[in-house]
Amino acid sequence: MTTSDTPQTVVARSRSDRGNVVAMDSAYHVAPHNRDRDVCVNASYCGVLPARFLAEHRPRGAIGMDCGVGPEGSAIAGLWFLEALSIPAAVADVMSAHLGDGIHLYRHGVISYANQPARDRGVECGMTVADAAERLLEHDAPTHRAAADITNRTIMYSDGDRHVIATDSIAFALPEDRDRNVLVTAGHTGRSAVPYLLQAQPHGFICSDGGRGMDDSGIVGLVMVETHGLAGATVDARYARMGSGMSHYHDGVISAANVHAIARGVRVGMPCSEAARILLLNS
């Protein structure tokens, strides 16, 4: 069924009258009646410009296409534009469905990226667009989370009651990390990170080098915490996504380490996952 006032096709209806999944060929076809109700499956790229059109009418959720991601992630940058507005959104692999054909995207698309509000509702990479749209339509986020709330704190490796934990910020350290856990976090290791590192006092840490920066300002914290006995390293910001502890753990490559981390066996060029286990297992 195509709606009367805009080129939208209802492809699925809520079981509990929450709204519909509507397919459209372009993000520009989102309309006022979609507000807070419908999941808009649109066969556009998900850059900032299409996201602005989507955000104007604030649908319940949105699914677009990744268009090869592009330089600086330009084709999917709208995911985080929408995340900042608490609008769940995802994109499908452009090789899985036809660009410009919303119905084909709904029937054949496979999710390649999702923002945090979408993941909170159960959307995962590799899921079909139809399944992802159903999740966005039928599920709400567990609770509203403030920016400072701890998110994505995931145990990646354990040795008894001690763990390697991936989290998005050193500010998300907990008291139980002190002298016990290795934290793989996703901020830079400049001077502003030092108070958080000293407060957390983890058994070890791995953060980002922030692109190193002028005068190595992105890694100066490694040296600043040495006098406090903290073992730490950084990963190369060119390979792991800042803001994502999981990306640091899986994609990170060690770019620098302080004397305590080197003494435990950490080396430049080592995968982050390997370095994190070495930090945990050695004193």
Image (cartoon, grey):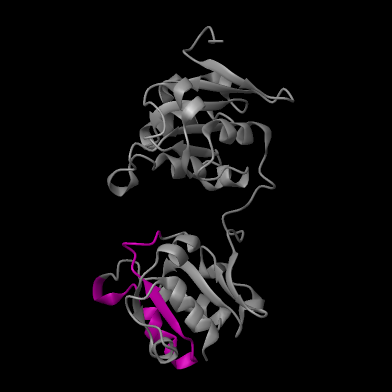
Q: As displayed, is residue 20 above or below residue 167?
A: above
The reply to whether residue 76 is in sight is yes
Q: Image quadrant for the N terminus?
A: top right
Is residue 237 in the magenta section?
yes
Q: Position of residue 232 (x, y in %)?
A: 44, 81
Q: Position of residue 178 (x, y in %)?
A: 61, 82
Dividing the picture into quadrants, the one containing residue 188 is: bottom left
Considering every residue shown, the one lying at the far top of the view is 4
Which residue is located at x 56 percent, y 80 percent?
199
Total marks placed: 0
Dividing the picture into quadrants, the one containing residue 201 is: bottom right
The reply to whether residue 30 is in sight is no
Q: Position of residue 30 (x, y in %)?
A: 48, 22
Is residue 64 in the magenta section?
no
Q: As displayed, is residue 116 above or below residue 192?
A: above
Judge by depth and name the residue closer to the eye, 174 or 183. 183
Judge by depth and name the residue closer to the eye, 107 or 42. 107
Judge by depth and name the residue closer to the eye, 184 or 195. 184
Considering every residue shown, the one lying at the far right of the view is 16
Which residue is located at x 56 percent, y 30 percent?
130
Viewed as shown, does residue 262 lie left or right of 152? left
Give the magenta-colored segment's residue range.
Answer: 214-241
Which residue is located at x 48 percent, y 12 percent?
6
Which residue is located at x 63 percent, y 51 percent?
145
Dividing the picture into quadrants, the one containing residue 172 is: bottom right
Q: As displayed, is residue 213 above or below residue 57?
A: below
Q: Position of residue 96 (x, y in %)?
A: 41, 33
Q: As displayed, is residue 88 above or below residue 40?
A: below
